[in-house]
Every structure is written in structure tokens, then in C-alpha cells.
Image: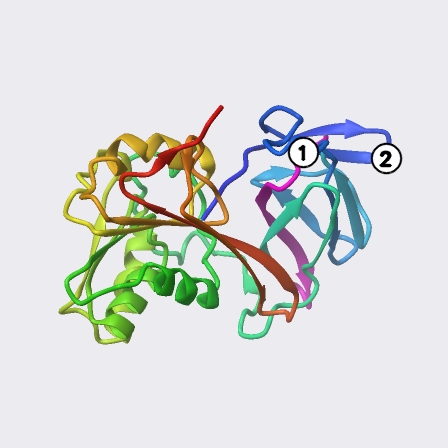
Amino acid sequence: MVRIRTQLVLGLAGLALWFQVPPLMSRQGAAAQPALLRVQVPAGAELLVDGTRTKQTGSERYFQSPPLPAGRKFIYSLKATWKEDGKEVVREEVARVEAGQETIVDLRQAAPGKEAKAADNPSQSKEVRKPKREPDIFFLPTPQAVVDRMLELADLKKDDVVYDLGCGDGRFVVTAAEKYGVKATGFDIDPERVKDSLENVKKHHVEKLVTIKEADIFELDLRPASVVTLYLLPELNEKLMPQLSKLRPGSRILSHDFPMDGAKPKKVERMKVKNDRGEESEHTIYLWTVPWEMEKP
């Protein structure tokens, strides 16, 4: 689950996406390059990027970022709204972009099993309880194949305790309990994600092993855990380092896609996974063991 805050600015060829990013050279010294994004929507659709309305029109909307650090992944949310057979239709998706590459997102057709939804009717919608503060990230699920591999790399034993920080729909803790029989707890600040996780726990009948809690992950005592899973931005991983450093020696920390700056990973593994549309994308898994080795400047 990751969020990139974006600001929209007018460029020579239309709107460009301005990312708040680190300096324009990656740690490996590779030159930064812009990322390209093509969004396909019905011609009259309204398109929002991270909640900000864009001004382009037509069935294809083109965006280019300023130069981004090489080897880093960035994501943001897309939301298209249009009229279809007299009804308002909303379709949402998350785009993953990388420096020097073009990403194409087609919002005209729903992914298999993910139908477009009608816009909410305020008079009929149920009251949604808001989190006590704005979440640091929006929900983007880790592909199940990546979840499986991360837990495999964690080398789980029966006496391990798994904590998933920002648990989303609970797939990490549910898989850990169902596949390895370990106790697991998922934490999320968003009540809606907590609700999703509890439903997933019940669906898979792992209530005796899995606990879901609404909580701010930066206020947690993580010491009861022996394995911690993350899908957060690098700066959030770094913010957690004082808490993570208090884990027992030998505890494992695993992160999907994003490093923990300052901590040298014990292992970095890349894998390619297809999404619901059959599109292949690369994912990175980082593994640290406590106490971790500090990276040299």
C-alpha cells in the first residue's frame, strides 16, 4: 500500500504529473528519467489523479513526470467518471510507474471480477466512520503471489508471531495463519480496511489465529512480533526503524517494493507477476534480519 502525493502542472504537451521525489540521481548513480503514463477512458470522462481533477479531454490522456530516480517505483490512484445509458459510472484503478518507462492504464473496461460501480447515492449510502487521522497511504493490495513469496522468505515456524503494518484486506495475516498455522495480527488506521480484514478472516475461518486491530502503526509496541511485513513508502519504513530495531534478535522484516533507507537488506529478490488484466509487472521483496547492518553513506 503506497501513496504518492501529486501536484498537477501545465506542460508543453498538456498536463504533467509532478511527483514529490528525492534528488534526481539514484543511489546507484543512474541518471533520473521521466515516467510516461497513458490513461484510456471514454471521451467524455472526468479523470481524477489522487483526487485532483485533470483538464485533458479525449479517449487517451497523456502525462509525463519530471525526472524520477532510477530503480524506484511510484504509484498513484486514478478515478474516472462518465455517463453510460443514463447512469453515472465510476471506475478506479492504481497505476504503477517507473523512470524511463511508459505505463498504460485502460479504464474503459473493468478488470475480470472488478466491475465498474455506480456512483454513490448520498441518501442511500451508509455512514462511513473516518480514521482518527488521514492514512499515510491508500490501499493497494500486494499480489497474492508476492504475499506467498514474502512469507516463504520469512521462513515461518509454528512459534512465530506475524505483524502486518497497514493490513488492508488482511491477506498477509490470513495467509500466514492458513498456510503456516502461526498467530498473526494486522493493524490499520482505516476503519474500512479493518472491516475488510475482519471479513477476510471470517471467510477463511482463521479467527483463532488472527487478530485485526484499528491502530496507528507509529504508536505500536512491535516487540511481541518475530516477523513484520510492510508495504509502505521508504520514508514510512524509515520512520518505523526505531520501533523495528527493538524486535528480538533474529526477527525478520519484509517489505514489498520499497526499501528501508539506512538499513542494508539481507536479501533482495525480484519477481514478475500478472495482474487481473493479464499485464505483467515486476515486484521487489526486501528482507532484513534484526539487528540489521547499516548501509554505508
> Total of numbered circles in the picture?
2
Does the magenta stretch mainly form a helix, a strand or a loop? strand
Q: Amino acid at mark 2?
A: Ala
Q: Amino acid at mark 1?
A: Leu
What color scheme is it?
Answer: rainbow
- Give residue 190's position: percent from left, percent from top: 32, 46
- Give residue 122's position: percent from left, percent from top: 44, 52
Residue ID for mark 2: 13
| Magenta region includes residue 39 | no
Is residue 127 something one can see in this rendering? Answer: no
Q: Does label 1 or label 2 sit earlier along the sequence?
A: 2
Segment tinted magenta in the rendering: 67-89
**Is residue 293 left or right of 80 when viewed as pictured?**
left
- The label nearer to you, 1 versus 2, is 1
Q: Residue at x 63, y 69 (%)?
A: 277
Name the foreground residue: 110 vs 160.
160
Label at residue 166? none
* C-beta proximity under 8 Å, tags 1 and 2: no
Q: Residues within 10 Å of mark 1 (few under 14, many from 20)?
A: many
Give the vertical position of 195 relative to 201 (above or below).
Answer: above
Q: Residue at x 17, y 39 (%)?
A: 221
Q: Residues within 10 Å of mark 2 (few under 14, many from 20)?
A: few
**Is residue 158 left or right of 288 when viewed as pictured?**
left
Q: Residue at x 17, y 67 (%)?
A: 158
Separation of marks 1 and 2 at Cα, in angstroms: 18 Å
Residue ID for mark 1: 68
